Amino acid sequence: MNTNIAFDGSRSLVASQFYVKTPDGAHVPRFGPAITISQQTGSGAHDIAERLAGMLQQSEPDHLAQWSVFDRQLVLKALEEHQWPARIERYMAEDRRSYVQDVMDELFGLRPPSWVLVPQIAETIMRLVKTGHVILVGRGSVAVATDLPGVFHVRLVASLPKRINRIKSVFNFNAEDAVKYIRREDRGSRRYTQAHFHANLDNDLLYHLVINTDRIPYSEAALLIAAEARKAFARDGDSYDKIGD
């Protein structure tokens, strides 16, 4: 079963629901503001995303809109939207699954197959970026929302030694276990995005901004993303205003 076909269909259906009327009477899809963050494991995505949300929140007029971060919560949100039990989340590592694995898991009631779940996660991502004021970490968010106006894409990278130290600190791993964890997570993310969305996470052209967190501290990275994202959102807003002029 080709999950990419199912994803394309659900993506088109969801996108068709989010149109705004331009001055000349035409209708165009409008999304965001939203930010996706892809990372090499241990580059600081969660820490930076939380700082970024706080910075963006401070600039909201009257704090009417609430910026939210979705990483693990992204899967839980998808399960909730599609009325799956939350327990399924434990079986949903970010990786490509074989057809046999999917069939066996479905047979034993562990989880629905990838050709059902992945398009549903993608649909949830689309709905979140439409709602706006969200920061989405992982789960192929950059590929799902790659060409949507109002969405800013970021990639975080760092050297392996720095990432090992980060993972050792967060999970209390030894160096060997940290390396295994990093390799497993990075491999899984790449295979998930390639298999389901035909996108290469290491392709810098997917992103508005690539940051090396060896050289840019987390607090400065969050400031940089906030500044560049605001500029991009303003440009996208201007493009809507000019349609039909």
Image: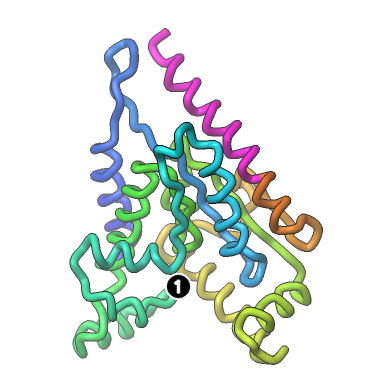
In this rendering, does residue 1 appear at all?
no
The residue shown at (53%, 50%) is 53
Nearer to us in this view, 235 or 56: 56
- The answer to whether 15 is drawn above or below residue 239 in the figure is below
* Quarter holding residue 178: bottom right
Horizontal and vertical percent position of residue 244: 38, 11
Q: Element at badge 1?
A: loop
Q: Nearer the viewer, residue 72 or 107?
A: 72
- Prevailing secondary structure of the magenta residues: helix
Q: Position of residue 17 (x, y in %)?
A: 24, 38
Is any atom of residue 169 visible in this view?
Answer: yes
Give amino acid for label 1. Glu
Give the residue at x 65% y 71%. 42
The residue closer to the viewer here, 156 or 103, is 156
Give the residues in magenta. Answer: 225-245
Residue 55 highlighted magenta (yes or no) = no
* Residue lying at 37% horizontally and 32% vertically, measured from the top left: 30
Q: What residue did someone put label 1 on?
A: 94
The image quarter in which residue 241 lies: top left
Asked if residue 115 is positioned above or below residue 155 in the image, the reply reads: below
Instruction: Please check the rendered image and state whether residue 238 is part of the magenta-colored stretch, yes or no.
Output: yes
Task: Identify the residue at the far right of this view.
Answer: 215
Quadrant for the C terminus, please: top left
Residue at coordinates 60% horizontally, 63% vertically from top-left?
47
